[in-house]
């Protein structure tokens, strides 16, 4: 925004809170405008009173240590110097191979460059990468897609070979590569830089699950299967390395982080589910193999049943959800069959029930930072369903999710009728067969 | 020396970045119109109002006007066109 | 042959396990008292009650008594003494 | 229990649901009574109607495929054969070193034996284990403690060296070793075999945090720091390998599994917290280093604030928890300072508020499988607070947690006033200095 104003001849100063300093500077660099004028106020702005914000304006810019208003005014009036005029342009092409070195030194290099999740990796030697590339019929230099840490950052491009490199690092085997390529091609990053520490969870459907020996039983969402673990981790590492990084303060701003970011991929228990598989619901054939990508991971509610008071329990979990992030439900087959016995013979019926029963008073719905930033402007602009939610009286109960935002997956080892309600907006369901 | 290994570089390919020039600066803000762009962040409206009041109190000759894009995170060309047409400078905040 | 390495075994040390004999079996259950031990698992009381009714219908000569330990997972020595003293066999369930 | 009855001379048959078959066999073996008489009914028993249970009794044992009642009666009457009589005793000593082999084959051996979390490990060569042992002054053969996957399983024992082996596998450095030893000495496993897919979360306090560069800022509960990642993973791997394993169906029964089980350790942001550090609350001095181990990880509720409607939001989250697993609150410093500004100048005040506001109708409180199983017998035996909860009428609102069960920790990078409410009962504490 600021860059485009400058280009239309309008001198501009962008104001940020101090924690965003390094991020704002590297975004300016990536936009080809490293000399962009920026001024900073203390963190946080959210929840501060007007008086407190006035002290920010009359106070000191915590980054430059000079008066804030002086920074702003000089940013608009101080004449451009030589350096400002030419702007900086650079071709950041990435090398294919690194300088040869000992194993110990290379492992340290990968850690110090933030190329790993700080757990041990398998070094991507030429031999191992060539081996991994046998897992697909596609050419190593074929462009798989683009990724970026968030929508105001520039897209980076990735090839089959670069995906293979990160797959080797994760400990994956060649037969897993088509799944990993599909996840990379989804265009959804598993390393969002958002201050809300999001994570990306992927569900695999179709014949590929059994071809690779994926787990949909006991310990399905845990460290109990090679394919689940390696595919999830490959998706996490390629997101980090193929989008320009995920470095705290620069390309990662998640205040509290998310442990799901290590590895979070599993297979639906289609054979033991009373309902239609997820990918078939999204238009794939049962014999197709597909990967679904859920963006969220911010809350995880849990329960058993359905027991006698299941409606109260599920309602409590739905209304405790963060209402900018819709849930997807993971039901153990025992729980799924329990719901079928109650008459929910189709996933859609239970989804409908959840949408009808996820209720909050309007007052609480609007008292949320994300809703204010993302949804409120849309409501004001008359976009439904937000506009009606805005009209509701403070104590009026409103439905916080639409049915089409909620999904259900069946997985578990049937040692307990357990279920989980995980924050996850289904952003994409992509073909795996296309990458065989 | 431990046996040396060659490994791949795990990073993706960044887009080619072309340099862009900054707009030339004003000699001063006297009698100029400065747009205060509220980026719709939670509470940034209150911040921009305080900034407007600061200008009105300290630099009354500056015509500071608050303006909002239609949607957060999305470029708003019409709003930019209006700023370019009616304004001489812009202050954006508070966020990215 | 790739260069061979020697590495440690990552497992801990299990306790020494001494063999224990099973109790001698009964020739038949007729006229015997069998304790049905409800391990307090959710719904196992209903299960044991039904076992008692099954014996009542199909093997009326067998006396059955449902009994519960004081606490889950913990050994209940008094209950065991009671079974050993007044019973000839026990059926535990449903769980571990 | 069954073994004890047999020793009292009482022929016994243990009835299990069929998913527990392999586990029941393994337990019998470990109790030195491999020939113990066991019979099985279909899973689940929970929630089945009396008629359905009668169907189980009159039906077939799903494991032996013979009539269930026949299995039971024969178990009590069929005479012992030769094998039954001598029982089986064995000395399961574990070797110190494995057969030498190529690194490729050893990596595969570690996967196939379930010695890993299916992510790449660093092979524990003699040289690497030697280097790790330099991280402590204590002798390699000193017994650190004992661990077991469940209360009904036998304890396994382990030494400083065996902990070092697993620390090397996790990618840890010698300077992390005292923290890892303290976690191993806590006696709490990070690989519970419960059907409940529990995980164990560890909080590190005191000077050790900065000595080894732990993270308490941006991405604190995520893959953004070497010490956090390696310590958490070492605790997971040692729990798995030093307690006799964690194999689905045998020594792990978690129906859904838990991704926190990869690695879940972090440092409290003592320097940026408005309150007393966790370990000081628990009796340690500020300049002592300690670890606290929280057993749960079953639910994770999330929120921002405190905003205007923070009380409603907090109450919704507190009543949507699983009432057998008390919460650990992790507050970003911005949120913590927000609560301090509201008058919660001591952690204890916010803990008391949570205890008073975590409420459910008695009807819902008791309608839970684990509460029935764990708390009901105590209530019946007159143990408080369970007894009074049992006396409450169905629609009476009761408090579901005691203040002592709830804990608060401050950690986060201050890019957002976020907080998390993670299922976690404080089960273990240990001094780190004792293991330097």
Image: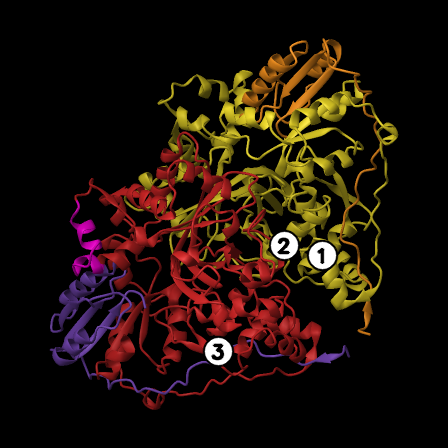
Chain colours: A yellow, B orange, C purple, D red
Q: Does residue A363 belong to the magenta stretch?
A: no
Magenta-colored segment: predominant secondary structure: helix
Residue at label 2?
A233
**What residue is pinned by disc 3?**
D158
Residue lying at 21% horizontally and 72% vertically, measured from the top left: C76
- Number of the front mark, 3 or 2: 3
- Image location (x, y in percent) of residue B76: 68, 19
Separation (CA) of disc 1 from disc 2? 19 Å
Q: Quadrant of residue A381?
A: top right
The CA span between labels 3 and 2 is 31 Å
Question: In the rendering, at what x and y percent does residue B2 appear?
Answer: 80, 73
Q: Point out the image quarter for the N terminus of chain D.
A: bottom left
Q: Residues within 10 Å of mark 2 (few under 14, many from 20)?
A: many
Q: Secondary structure at mark 1?
A: helix
Q: Which residues are magenta?
A: D377-392
Neighbour class for label 1 at 10 Å: few (<14), some, many (≥20)? few
């Amino acid at each position: 925004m600021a860059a485009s104003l400058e280009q239309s001849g309008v001198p501009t100063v962008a104001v940020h809170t101090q924690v965003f300093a390094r991020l704002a500077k590297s975004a300016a660099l990536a936009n080809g405008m490293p000399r962009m004028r920026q001024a900073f106020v203390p963190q946080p702005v959210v929840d501060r009173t007007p008086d407190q914000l006035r002290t920010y304006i009359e106070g000191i810019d915590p980054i430059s240590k000079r008066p804030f208003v002086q920074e702003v005014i000089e940013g608009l009036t101080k004449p451009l110097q030589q350096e400002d005029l030419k702007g900086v342009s650079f071709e950041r092409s990435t090398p294919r191979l690194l300088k040869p070195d000992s194993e110990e030194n290379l492992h340290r290099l990968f850690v110090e460059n933030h190329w790993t999740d700080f757990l041990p990796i398998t070094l991507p030697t030429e031999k191992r990468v060539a081996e991994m590339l046998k897992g697909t019929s596609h050419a190593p230099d074929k462009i798989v897609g683009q990724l970026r840490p968030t929508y105001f950052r520039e897209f980076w491009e990735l090839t089959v070979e670069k995906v293979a490199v990160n797959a080797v690092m994760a400990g994956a085997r060649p037969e897993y590569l088509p799944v990993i390529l599909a996840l990379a091609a989804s265009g959804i990053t598993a390393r969002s830089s958002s201050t809300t520490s999001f994570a990306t969870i992927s569900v695999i459907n179709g014949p590929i699950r059994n071809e690779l020996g994926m787990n949909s039983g006991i310990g399905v969402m845990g460290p109990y299967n090679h394919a689940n673990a390696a595919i999830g981790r490959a998706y996490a590492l390629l997101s980090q390395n193929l989008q320009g990084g995920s470095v705290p303060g620069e390309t990662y701003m998640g205040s509290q982080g998310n442990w799901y970011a290590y590895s979070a991929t599993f297979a639906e228990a289609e054979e033991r589910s009373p309902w239609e598989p997820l990918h078939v619901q999204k238009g794939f054939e049962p014999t197709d193999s597909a990967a679904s990508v859920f963006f969220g991971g911010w809350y995880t509610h849990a329960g058993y049943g359905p027991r006698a008071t299941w409606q109260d329990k599920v309602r409590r979990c739905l209304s405790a959800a963060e209402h900018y992030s819709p849930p997807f439900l993971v039901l153990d087959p025992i729980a799924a069959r329990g719901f079928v016995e109650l008459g929910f013979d189709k996933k859609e019926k239970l989804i409908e029930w959840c949408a009808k029963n996820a209720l909050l008073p309007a007052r609480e719905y609007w008292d949320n930072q994300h809703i204010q930033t993302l949804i409120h402007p849309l409501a004001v602009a008359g976009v439904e369903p937000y506009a009606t939610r805005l009209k509701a009286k403070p104590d009026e109960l409103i439905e916080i999710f639409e049915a089409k935002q909620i999904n259900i997956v069946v997985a578990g080892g049937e040692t307990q009728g357990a279920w989980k309600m995980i924050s996850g907006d289904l952003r994409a369901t992509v073909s795996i067969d296309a990458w065989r | 020396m431990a046996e040396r290994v060659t490994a791949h570089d795990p990073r993706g390919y960044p887009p080619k970045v072309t340099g862009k020039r900054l707009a030339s600066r004003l000699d001063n803000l006297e009698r100029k119109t400065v747009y205060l762009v509220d980026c719709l962040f939670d509470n940034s409206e209150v911040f921009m109002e305080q900034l407007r009041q600061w200008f009105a109190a300290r630099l009354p000759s500056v015509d500071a006007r608050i303006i909002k894009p239609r949607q957060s995170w999305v470029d708003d060309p019409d709003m930019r066109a209006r700023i370019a047409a009616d304004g001489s400078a812009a202050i954006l905040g508070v966020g990215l | 042959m790739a260069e061979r390495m020697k590495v440690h075994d990552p497992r801990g040390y299990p306790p020494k396990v001494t063999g224990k004999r099973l109790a001698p079996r009964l020739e038949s259950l007729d006229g015997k008292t069998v304790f049905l031990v409800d391990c307090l698992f959710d719904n196992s009381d209903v299960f044991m009650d039904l076992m008692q009714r099954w014996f009542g219908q199909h093997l009326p000569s067998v006396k059955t008594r449902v009994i519960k330990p004081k606490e889950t997972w913990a050994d209940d020595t008094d209950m065991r003494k009671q079974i050993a003293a007044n019973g000839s066999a026990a059926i535990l369930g449903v769980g571990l | 229990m069954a073994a004890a009855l047999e020793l009292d001379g009482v022929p016994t048959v243990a009835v299990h649901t069929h998913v527990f078959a392999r586990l029941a066999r393994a337990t019998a073996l470990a109790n030195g009574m491999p020939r113990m008489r066991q019979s099985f009914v279909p899973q689940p028993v929970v929630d089945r109607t009396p008629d359905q249970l009668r169907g189980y009794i009159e039906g077939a044992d799903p494991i032996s495929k013979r009539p269930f009642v026949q299995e039971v009666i024969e178990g009590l009457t069929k005479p012992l054969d030769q094998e039954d009589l001598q029982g089986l005793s064995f000395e399961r000593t574990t070797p110190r070193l494995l057969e030498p082999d190529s690194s490729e084959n050893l990596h595969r051996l570690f996967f196939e034996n379930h010695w890993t979390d299916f992510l790449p490990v660093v092979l524990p060569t003699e040289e690497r284990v030697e280097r790790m042992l330099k991280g402590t002054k204590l002798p390699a053969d000193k017994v650190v403690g004992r661990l077991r996957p469940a209360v009904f399983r036998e304890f396994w024992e382990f030494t400083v060296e065996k902990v070092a082996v697993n620390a090397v596998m996790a990618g840890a450095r010698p300077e992390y070793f005292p923290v890892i030893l303290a976690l191993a000495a806590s006696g709490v496993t990070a690989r519970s075999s419960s059907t409940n897919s529990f995980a164990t979360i560890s909080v590190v306090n005191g000077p050790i945090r900065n000595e080894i560069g732990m993270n308490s800022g941006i991405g604190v509960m995520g893959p953004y720091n070497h010490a956090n990642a390696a310590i958490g993973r070492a605790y997971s791997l040692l729990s798995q390998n030093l307690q006799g394993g964690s194999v689905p169906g045998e020594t792990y029964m978690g129906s859904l599994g838990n991704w926190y089980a990869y690695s879940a350790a972090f440092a409290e942001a003592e320097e940026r917290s408005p309150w007393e550090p966790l370990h000081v609350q628990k009796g340690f001095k500020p300049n002592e280093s300690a670890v606290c181990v929280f057993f749960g990880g079953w639910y994770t509720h999330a929120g921002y604030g405190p905003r205007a409607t923070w009380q409603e939001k907090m109450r919704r989250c507190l009543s949507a928890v699983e009432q057998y697993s008390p919460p650990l609150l992790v507050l970003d410093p911005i949120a913590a300072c927000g609560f301090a500004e509201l008058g919660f100048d001591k952690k204890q005040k916010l803990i008391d508020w949570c205890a008073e506001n975590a409420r459910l109708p008695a009807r819902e409180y008791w309608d839970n499988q684990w509460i029935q199983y764990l708390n009901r017998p105590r209530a019946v035996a007159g143990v408080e607070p369970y007894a009074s909860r049992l006396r409450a009428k169905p629609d009476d609102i009761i408090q579901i947690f005691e203040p002592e069960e709830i804990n608060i920790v401050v950690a986060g990078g201050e890019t957002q006033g976020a907080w998390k409410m993670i299922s976690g009962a404080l089960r273990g504490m240990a001094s780190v200095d004792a293991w330097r």
